[in-house]
Image (spheres, rainbow, N blue to C red):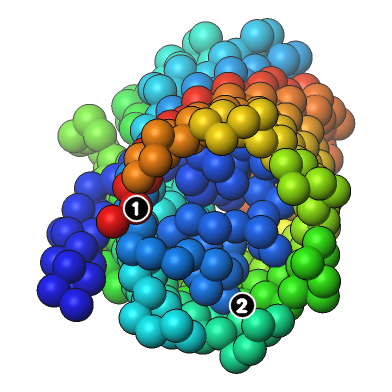
Amino acid sequence: MKKILLFSALLLSSAFSAFAGHVDTYGIGSKATSMGGAVVAGIDDPFAVYYNPAAMSNIQQPMLSVGTHLVDPHLTIKQYRVNTSGALADDSFGADGIKDEADLLIVPHMGYVHPITDKLTFGVAFYVPYGLDLKWNADPNENPAAYNTYHSWYMREVVTPSLSYKVNDKLSIGAGISIGKAKAGNERKRYVPEKMKNSTYMAGVAQANGVPSAQAPAVGAALAAAYTELDGADIDMEYEDNFNWSYNLGVLYKFTDKLTGGITYRSYSNIDLEGDAEVTPEMAYWKNENLGSDTAVDTPDSIQFGLEYKVTPKFKVEADIVRTFWSRIGSYTVYMDDYLLQSELDPTFIPGANEEYFERNWKDTWQYRVGAEYLLNDKVALRAGYYYDPTVVPEDTFDVLWPDSDKHVFSGGVGLNFGKVTVDTVVQYILISEVTIDSGSSHNLDDSYSRPGLHDADVSAVAGGHIWSFGVTASYKF
């Protein structure tokens, strides 16, 4: 029991320094990842805590696993075009071949399982069930999508203590509680049309709005100077939720010596984020550049079903389906303590905004997964997997903050058995299907270049890419 408590304390102390990649996990533990995550009925390492806590009953002796995945995204936005219109805007600009500049993402995982009795097993694991960290060129002259987002991140890291109970030789049940911490944020540039930076034009606008002709040039010059100062300003929003929770429930049933079924439910988590909205550089014509803000972006619940079939003593296959209820994220609003970027010239005419609304309307999805393992001999296991992951993002809410498209995920790996020590490896390739955003079809993109009553925009784009992932997990059986 002292070992259990010590390991739990180590996980809790180290968990929140981790770093993640991508909005949804592409695997936890190299063995499960190499089999395409199709392991809900057959997993036999500490990451059963995530995939199916009931399956911890398959582990007959204390087992410690530690590993990491390295994720290298290669994303490209092509044919990005912006057309603005209205009394204060008539710009047309774009760029081709905008590539992500994300660092190599390091995603750690750790777990420990300890049988307490013949029927009761305890386990605890640290992992990152949800994460995203994407960076793009911050220069809007080279990357006009920076006006929407040039850096976005969202990560939830959890420690999950769990128990499994072996009801009889055929049936096991399990449950765990995930205690988590979340971080989120985005960085973007502020877009200002060329007309609004032209003092002569703005003088005419001022005069048309009732400013006397003698005063219009001075007013126009002040307005143009204010908007020139605002153009390209950095808006940085950062948030944290220091405590949230969810739970995992699992069932494992052995139909025959060859056929086993599993089912896992992973609950949603309420994520309440608090932080700051900050604008740089320091400005003369604008106030409220640093405000407290808050929002809530929950994580969805999911249910996973699977069947494992042992074709021979050396060869087994599994097929799983996963239903994820992304529709829980219909929208969210960022609330600020005051009016961000309120004008020093005329707070009534240019009041700023005290909230930002983001419509999402994400879609529930079905993932289809298959995995296989072949024991070449007592020391070497060969594994492979595939799954199809349809996009959760509809075209009308696509943006660079939460980019997504249909994905085909291929994986393979080798397991090496050295007795008490095993080493599992994985190579994963994620092909991201190209998505086309027709002009004006995504209001989330359009809104980055629009201001109600001032100017409107239509944005079009083509986006796609691929991701390479490499992982290794070492395990020790006590």
Q: In x, y percent, where is residue 257?
A: 78, 67
Residue 343 position, x and y percent, is 33, 48
84 over 123 or under it: above or below:
above
Query: Residue 246 or 117: which is nearer the viewer?
Result: 117
Q: Is residue 235 left or right of residue 300?
A: left
Q: Name which residue lies at 46% across and 18% down.
A: 101
What x and y, as percent, mark residue 13?
Answer: 16, 59
Cα–Cα gap, marks 2 and 1: 24 Å
Residue 242 position, x and y percent, is 26, 68
Taking the spot 65% from the left edge, 18% from the top edge, the residue there is 76
Q: Nearer the viewer, residue 218 or 392?
A: 392
Q: Which residue does the image show at 34% across and 81% down from the upper left? A: 116
Residue 284 quadrant: top left
Crowd class of label 2 (few under 14; some 14 to 19; many from 20; radius 10 Å): many
Name the residue beneath numbered marker 1: 477
Under mark 2, the amino acid is Gly
Are there few (<14), some (14-19), or many (20+) residues within 10 Å of tag 1?
Answer: some
Residue found at x 65% / y 9% = 97
Comes first in the chain, label 2 or label 1: 2
Q: Mark 2 = which residue?
A: 250
| Quadrant (top left/top right/bottom left/bottom right) for the N terminus | bottom left
